[in-house]
Amino acid sequence: MESLKTEGTNFVKLGDDFNDSVRRLVNGLAKLRAGEPTKDVAAKQKQPEEKSFGEQLWSSLTTLDSKSSAPPWGDDDLGEKFGVVYEGLRDGMYESMGHLAAKLEEVGKALTAMSKHHAENEDFNDSLMKQHVKNEQAWDDPYKGAVVQRKLGPVT
Protein backbone atom coordinates (compact mmCIF):
# COMPACT_ATOMS: atom_id res chain seq x y z
CA MET A 1 0.00 0.00 0.00
CA GLU A 2 2.80 2.40 0.86
CA SER A 3 4.52 1.63 -2.42
CA LEU A 4 1.39 2.62 -4.38
CA LYS A 5 1.20 5.85 -2.44
CA THR A 6 4.90 6.52 -3.05
CA GLU A 7 4.59 5.76 -6.76
CA GLY A 8 1.55 8.04 -6.96
CA THR A 9 3.50 10.87 -5.36
CA ASN A 10 6.41 10.21 -7.73
CA PHE A 11 4.14 10.35 -10.78
CA VAL A 12 2.58 13.64 -9.65
CA LYS A 13 6.08 15.07 -9.15
CA LEU A 14 7.17 13.70 -12.54
CA GLY A 15 4.17 15.39 -14.19
CA ASP A 16 4.96 18.69 -12.45
CA ASP A 17 8.64 18.48 -13.44
CA PHE A 18 7.73 17.62 -17.03
CA ASN A 19 5.30 20.54 -17.16
CA ASP A 20 8.01 22.89 -15.86
CA SER A 21 10.41 21.56 -18.51
CA VAL A 22 7.84 22.17 -21.24
CA ARG A 23 7.34 25.72 -19.97
CA ARG A 24 11.12 26.33 -20.01
CA LEU A 25 11.36 24.93 -23.54
CA VAL A 26 8.51 27.10 -24.81
CA ASN A 27 9.94 30.23 -23.22
CA GLY A 28 13.48 29.37 -24.39
CA LEU A 29 12.27 29.05 -27.97
CA ALA A 30 10.40 32.33 -27.57
CA LYS A 31 13.66 34.04 -26.57
CA LEU A 32 15.15 32.75 -29.82
CA ARG A 33 12.09 34.15 -31.62
CA ALA A 34 11.14 30.64 -32.65
CA GLY A 35 7.76 30.64 -30.93
CA GLU A 36 5.37 32.40 -28.62
CA PRO A 37 6.08 32.46 -24.87
CA THR A 38 3.73 30.96 -22.31
CA LYS A 39 0.89 33.19 -21.11
CA ASP A 40 2.50 33.98 -17.74
CA VAL A 41 5.77 35.09 -19.39
CA ALA A 42 3.99 36.97 -22.17
CA ALA A 43 2.05 38.97 -19.57
CA LYS A 44 5.29 40.05 -17.87
CA GLN A 45 7.04 41.11 -21.07
CA LYS A 46 6.94 44.78 -21.90
CA GLN A 47 5.71 45.76 -25.32
CA PRO A 48 8.29 47.35 -27.66
CA GLU A 49 8.14 51.10 -27.95
CA GLU A 50 6.49 52.51 -31.05
CA LYS A 51 9.02 54.38 -33.19
CA SER A 52 8.32 57.21 -35.55
CA PHE A 53 8.86 56.67 -39.28
CA GLY A 54 12.15 58.59 -39.15
CA GLU A 55 13.40 56.50 -36.21
CA GLN A 56 12.41 53.30 -37.99
CA LEU A 57 14.20 54.40 -41.18
CA TRP A 58 17.37 55.38 -39.33
CA SER A 59 17.30 52.17 -37.29
CA SER A 60 16.88 50.02 -40.41
CA LEU A 61 19.82 51.76 -42.10
CA THR A 62 22.18 51.47 -39.15
CA THR A 63 21.19 48.15 -37.58
CA LEU A 64 19.58 44.87 -38.43
CA ASP A 65 16.35 45.94 -36.70
CA SER A 66 14.49 45.84 -40.00
CA LYS A 67 14.82 42.06 -39.84
CA SER A 68 13.84 41.81 -36.16
CA SER A 69 10.31 40.75 -37.03
CA ALA A 70 11.56 37.99 -39.37
CA PRO A 71 11.74 34.48 -37.95
CA PRO A 72 15.20 33.06 -37.18
CA TRP A 73 15.09 30.83 -40.28
CA GLY A 74 14.54 33.83 -42.55
CA ASP A 75 11.63 35.18 -44.52
CA ASP A 76 12.72 34.09 -47.99
CA ASP A 77 10.91 31.34 -49.91
CA LEU A 78 12.87 28.47 -48.36
CA GLY A 79 12.63 30.05 -44.88
CA GLU A 80 8.86 30.37 -45.21
CA LYS A 81 8.54 26.69 -46.22
CA PHE A 82 10.74 25.65 -43.32
CA GLY A 83 8.71 27.85 -40.97
CA VAL A 84 5.41 26.26 -41.98
CA VAL A 85 6.72 22.78 -41.25
CA TYR A 86 8.61 23.82 -38.10
CA GLU A 87 5.73 25.78 -36.58
CA GLY A 88 3.26 22.95 -37.22
CA LEU A 89 5.52 20.42 -35.54
CA ARG A 90 6.40 22.81 -32.71
CA ASP A 91 2.77 23.61 -31.94
CA GLY A 92 1.82 19.92 -32.03
CA MET A 93 4.72 19.14 -29.72
CA TYR A 94 3.64 21.86 -27.27
CA GLU A 95 0.13 20.47 -27.19
CA SER A 96 1.15 16.82 -26.81
CA MET A 97 3.79 17.56 -24.17
CA GLY A 98 1.30 19.54 -22.10
CA HIS A 99 -1.21 16.72 -22.45
CA LEU A 100 1.41 14.15 -21.41
CA ALA A 101 2.31 16.19 -18.31
CA ALA A 102 -1.37 16.37 -17.32
CA LYS A 103 -1.82 12.62 -17.83
CA LEU A 104 1.27 11.80 -15.75
CA GLU A 105 -0.20 13.84 -12.90
CA GLU A 106 -3.55 12.04 -13.32
CA VAL A 107 -1.83 8.65 -13.10
CA GLY A 108 -0.10 9.78 -9.91
CA LYS A 109 -3.33 10.95 -8.34
CA ALA A 110 -5.06 7.70 -9.35
CA LEU A 111 -2.27 5.60 -7.79
CA THR A 112 -2.49 7.62 -4.59
CA ALA A 113 -6.28 7.14 -4.49
CA MET A 114 -5.84 3.42 -5.22
CA SER A 115 -3.44 3.18 -2.28
CA LYS A 116 -5.96 4.85 0.02
CA HIS A 117 -8.82 2.61 -1.14
CA HIS A 118 -6.66 -0.50 -0.82
CA ALA A 119 -5.77 0.42 2.77
CA GLU A 120 -9.44 1.03 3.61
CA ASN A 121 -10.38 -2.32 2.06
CA GLU A 122 -7.67 -4.13 4.04
CA ASP A 123 -8.88 -2.51 7.28
CA PHE A 124 -12.48 -3.48 6.50
CA ASN A 125 -11.52 -7.08 5.69
CA ASP A 126 -9.43 -7.26 8.85
CA SER A 127 -12.35 -6.10 10.97
CA LEU A 128 -14.62 -8.72 9.34
CA MET A 129 -12.12 -11.46 10.03
CA LYS A 130 -11.94 -10.49 13.69
CA GLN A 131 -15.70 -10.74 14.19
CA HIS A 132 -16.88 -14.05 15.61
CA VAL A 133 -20.11 -15.27 14.09
CA LYS A 134 -21.37 -18.78 14.61
CA ASN A 135 -21.63 -20.56 11.31
CA GLU A 136 -23.92 -23.60 11.50
CA GLN A 137 -22.55 -25.04 8.27
CA ALA A 138 -18.92 -24.71 9.26
CA TRP A 139 -16.81 -27.63 10.43
CA ASP A 140 -16.90 -28.05 14.14
CA ASP A 141 -13.99 -29.54 16.07
CA PRO A 142 -15.31 -32.64 17.85
CA TYR A 143 -12.66 -32.30 20.56
CA LYS A 144 -13.45 -28.70 21.32
CA GLY A 145 -14.32 -28.36 24.96
CA ALA A 146 -13.89 -32.09 25.62
CA VAL A 147 -11.35 -33.25 28.08
CA VAL A 148 -9.01 -35.72 26.49
CA GLN A 149 -7.47 -38.13 28.89
CA ARG A 150 -4.62 -40.40 28.18
CA LYS A 151 -3.52 -43.32 30.22
CA LEU A 152 0.05 -43.19 31.11
CA GLY A 153 1.95 -46.34 31.62
CA PRO A 154 4.45 -46.88 34.40
CA VAL A 155 7.31 -44.51 34.43
CA THR A 156 10.65 -46.24 34.21
Image (cartoon, rainbow, N blue to C red):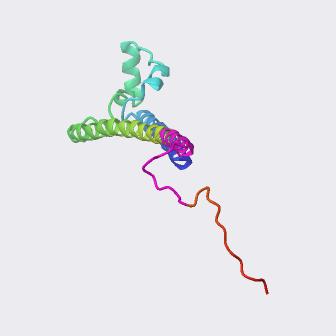
Place of residue 91 in the rendered image (x, y in percent of width and height, measured from the top left): 31, 35
Depicted 77 relative to depicted 38: above or below:
below
Report the front residue among 12 and 155.
155
Residue drawn at 36 percent across, 20 percent down: 57
How many discs appear? 0
**Closer-to-camera residue (34/110):** 110
Left or right placement of residue 62 versus residue 125 in this view: left
Quadrant of residue 72 within the rendered picture: top left
> Can you say whether 66 is above or below 123 in the image?
above
Q: Residue at x 67, y 72 (%)?
A: 150
Q: Which residue occupies the foreground of this view, 142 or 90? A: 142
Residue occupying the far right of the picture: 156
The answer to whether 52 appears left or right of 82 in the picture is: right
Residues drawn in magenta: 117-142
Is 134 covered by the magenta stretch?
Answer: yes
- Asked if the stretch drawn in magenta spans residue 23, the answer is no
Residue 78 falls left or right of residue 122: left
Task: Classify the position of the C terminus by image quarter.
Answer: bottom right
Percent coordinates x, y for residue 154 in the rendering: 76, 83
